[in-house]
Image: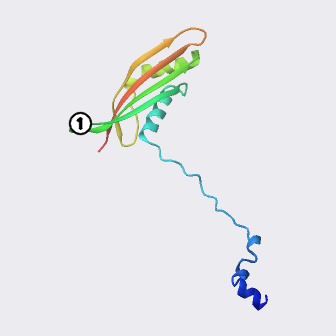
């Protein structure tokens, strides 16, 4: 490199081979989002149905009393077709007595509040479940 070139770009020698440098990225495991209480409620309900239902809506509302805090979950599931309806009927039958295992939560009440069963060419069952959760500790 000549003196006049170094005066024009004194850092040229630092970047001369930059195009030849291969940049390697580290491979890291994919980041998994932490499962929320609502996610765990939906998973537990779907397990009771054998995975046969489709989530229509899930509303979660915080609530508190003098001694407890928690959340109320209203979940609407749809079951289309005779095989899926069997899963919905399992949910209706098993929900009130089911012992949920949701970390940090106690399921104080689990009820079916509405059922819409339609027969025809495509049998359909829509079930609304309400769960009242209390925070443990």
Q: Where residue 4 appears, x then y in whole percent? A: 76, 89
Q: Where residue 23 appears, x then y in whole percent? A: 70, 66
Left or right, 10 with respect to 64, comes to right
The residue that label 1 is drawn on is 65
Could you tell me which quadrant the C terminus lies in?
top left
Left or right, 89 with respect to 6, comes to left
Quadrant of residue 19 within the rendered picture: bottom right
* Residue sitting at x 73%, y 82%: 13
Q: Which is more toward the observer, 23 or 8?
A: 8
Quadrant of residue 70 within the rendered picture: top left
Count of numbered circles on the image: 1
Name the element at disc 1. loop
Extreme residue toward the bottom, this view:
3
Q: Where residue 71 appears, x then y in whole percent? A: 34, 36
Q: Where residue 51 appears, x then y in whole percent? A: 54, 28
Quadrant of residue 52 within the rendered picture: top right
Estimate how packed mark 1 is, as few (under 14), some (14 to 19) or many (20 or more) residues with alpha carbons within 10 Å: few
* Residue sitting at x 35%, y 39%: 105
* Residue sitting at x 69%, y 82%: 11
Q: Is residue 123 above or below residue 137?
A: above
* Residue sitting at x 58%, y 16%: 81
Extreme residue toward the right, this view:
2
Could you tell me which quadrant the N terminus lies in?
bottom right
Q: Is residue 7 above or below residue 77?
A: below
Q: Which is more toward the observer, 92 or 125?
A: 125
Q: Is residue 24 above or below residue 56?
A: below
Extreme residue toward the left, this view:
66
Report the coloring of the rendering: rainbow
């Amino acid at each position: 490199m000549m003196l006049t070139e170094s005066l024009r770009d004194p850092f040229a020698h630092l970047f001369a081979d930059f195009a030849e440098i291969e940049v390697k990225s580290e491979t890291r495991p994919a980041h998994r989002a932490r499962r929320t209480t609502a996610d765990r409620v939906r998973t537990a309900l779907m397990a009771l149905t054998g995975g046969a239902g489709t989530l229509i809506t899930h509303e979660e509302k915080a609530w508190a009393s003098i001694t407890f805090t928690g959340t109320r979950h209203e979940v609407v599931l749809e079951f289309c077709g005779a095989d899926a309806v069997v899963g919905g009927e399992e949910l209706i039958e098993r929900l009130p007595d089911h012992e949920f295992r949701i970390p940090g939560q106690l399921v104080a009440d689990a009820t079916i509040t509405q059922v819409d069963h339609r027969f025809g060419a495509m049998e359909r069952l829509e079930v609304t479940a309400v769960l009242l959760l209390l925070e443990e500790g």
